[in-house]
Amino acid sequence: MRLFVAIEFPQELKDALASVITSLKEQGARANFTRRENMHLTLAFIGETPRLADAKAALDTVKAAPFRVALEGSGAFGDVFWVGAHHNPDMQRLAGKVRDALRAAGFTLDPKPFKPHITIARRLDCPGKPEVDVPKESAFVTEFVLMRSDRVDGRLVYTSVHRVPLSL
Ligand code: 2AM
């Protein structure tokens, strides 16, 4: 199965992200836009593995504080368009602890440094340079989630398979 570790969002944050998608559409953009239920911020990408129990056990060792995630900025990796998150040392620390715990358990992770973002469009094709206003929306994060990614009838479907609470 294909696994990754993420932060989920409440409705208000998804509304804010949906408004950015609406703005892209108003500019004539065509893309594979992220569906609301799939909006998330990835802390670590594990990829294909059969070791679900080991991943859960590794994540259970992570002790980190709750924090606030705030949307800020936007950008593109090639034709992938994302909304960014305000730099937050607590979120950065959490991503570091999650990655360290998974590596200690023998998982090989993508070596790219953590660049907090929420992908809202893939294969973006926009007539001009996309100009969007990202609403100043934020949410308090009290848990992180191990997610399973499946392709069902050509659609990406994410299912949470384990939740780990954050506490002081
Ligand atoms: P992305 O949104 O920038 O594509 C599930 O695929 C999640 O894991 C997505 O949030 C995706 O980020 C992230 N991810 C990180 N590294 C990845 C990789 N090498 N391949 C696929 N997804 C990756």
Image (cartoon, grey):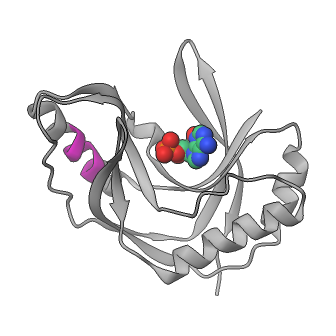
Count of marks placed on residues: 0
Q: Position of residue 157 (x, y in %)?
A: 57, 29
**Quadrant in the picture for the N terminus:** top right
Q: Residue at x 28, y 55 (%)?
A: 74
Q: Residue at x 29, y 49 (%)?
A: 17
Q: Looking at the image, is 156 positioned above or below residue 86?
A: above
Q: Report whether 161 appears left or right of 89.
A: right
Q: Position of residue 142 (x, y in %)?
A: 56, 71
Most common SS among magenta residues: helix
Q: Report whether 82 appears left or right of 88.
A: left
Q: Position of residue 155 (x, y in %)?
A: 51, 20
Q: Position of residue 92 (x, y in %)?
A: 55, 75
Q: Quadrant of residue 35?
A: top left
**Quadrant in the picture for the C terminus:** bottom right
Where does ligand 1 appear, by image quarter? Answer: top right
Q: Looking at the image, is 70 positioned above or below residue 48?
A: below
Q: Nearer the viewer, residue 108 or 39?
A: 108
Q: Residue at x 49, y 78 (%)?
A: 67
Q: Report whether 44 appears left or right of 76.
A: right
Q: Residue at x 82, y 55 (%)?
A: 56
Q: Looking at the image, is 31 positioned above or below residue 117?
A: above
Asked whether residue 39 is drawn in magenta, I would say no
Magenta residues (range) = 15-21
Asked whether residue 18 is drawn in magenta, I would say yes
